Amino acid sequence: MWIVSLGPGAADYLTPRAAEALRQAQVVVGYKTYLDLIEPLLHGKTVLASGMRKEIERCRKAVERALKGDGVALVSGGDAGIYGMAGLVFDVCQSLGVAVCDGLAQGDDAGEALPIEVIPGVAAFNAAASLLGAPLMHDFASISLSDHLTPWTVIEKRLMAAAEADFVIALYNPRSASRPDVLDRARSVLLRYRSGETPVGVVHRAMRAGQRHWVTTLKDLVGSNVDMQTVILVGNSQTYLWSGWMITPRGYLQKYTL
């Protein structure tokens, strides 16, 4: 069984190993929006698509088909190991009592275990950073603002800790119809520790149709023009803007000479 990372969505950013796994698979399982992005690679395959918040169902279907002997690819946007499907597959296998093994391991020691290969991809913060310049050149933290699975009290603690420690911060899931105010709440938390002039990069649909990106400041960041397909990168105390690019130096001390 392959857990395939699709990257940002454009075919140019799908890794050769991910494309090869999709070619080898007999069954492809995934969120319909992501499957639409790779439609040319799905001809002749059994495709099992489902909608939002059906992640557990997708994992169960993928594991069930793999246990029957089908070559199964479960797709995940970005990198499957970063807010993706990889961890959930292992959770489902553990709950079902399904033994798993490394799909890349050599030899016949696996026995009846289900071989799983997690194929990495370009994460959303990687894609976003490349469009903005070089904002992730120093330590950074990634925080999802969705309180669907994580209580807001926990999210707020993580925001405070990352802001106080002066990490560059990547914000996922900054706004949805059911959570229209979370970005404004997060911004208020960050402003306790960061200057209002802190550079912020906003990237919508990175490397996909409809891509937009711009830079602003923390005090001017507003939630009305972002959604669940937007990633926001908040600079640290050293991040600066130059010629339209957002740049974080590699350190705080001048340890390299230009």
Image (spheres, rainbow, N blue to C red):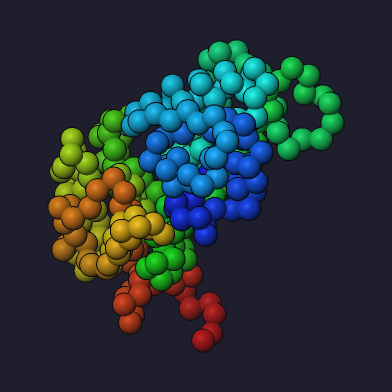
Placement of 188 over or under 63, stated as above or below: below
Q: Which residue corresponds to the image point at 18% horizontal and 55% vertical from the top-left?
A: 225
Q: Nearer the viewer, residue 105 or 143?
A: 105
Q: Nearer the viewer, residue 34 or 218?
A: 34
Placement of 131 over or under 147, stated as above or below: below
Q: Which residue, as the protein is rendered here, is positioned at the far front?
A: 44
* Position of residue 33 measured from the top left corner of the image (x, y, whole percent): 38, 41
Figure quadrant of the N terminus: top right
Q: Which residue corresponds to the image point at 31% horizontal and 49% vertical from the top-left?
A: 229
Q: Quadrant of residue 71?
A: top right
Q: Quadrant of residue 119?
A: top right
| Picture mark count | 0
* Position of residue 224 measured from the top left corner of the image (x, y, whole percent): 15, 52
Q: Which residue, as the protein is rendered here, is positioned at the far top?
A: 97
Q: Nearer the viewer, residue 149 or 70?
A: 70
* Position of residue 247 measured from the top left corner of the image (x, y, whole percent): 39, 72
* Position of residue 138 measured from the top left corner of the image (x, y, whole percent): 46, 63
**Is 254 left or right of 196, judged from the image as shown?**
right
Q: Which residue, as the protein is rendered here, is positioned at the far right?
A: 107
Residue 58 can be seen, yes or no: yes
Placement of 244 over or under 45, stated as above or below: below
Residue 88 can be seen, yes or no: no
Q: Which residue corresponds to the image point at 33% horizontal and 82% vertical from the top-left?
A: 243
Q: Quadrant of residue 130?
A: bottom left
**Is 32 left or right of 256, judged from the image as shown?**
left
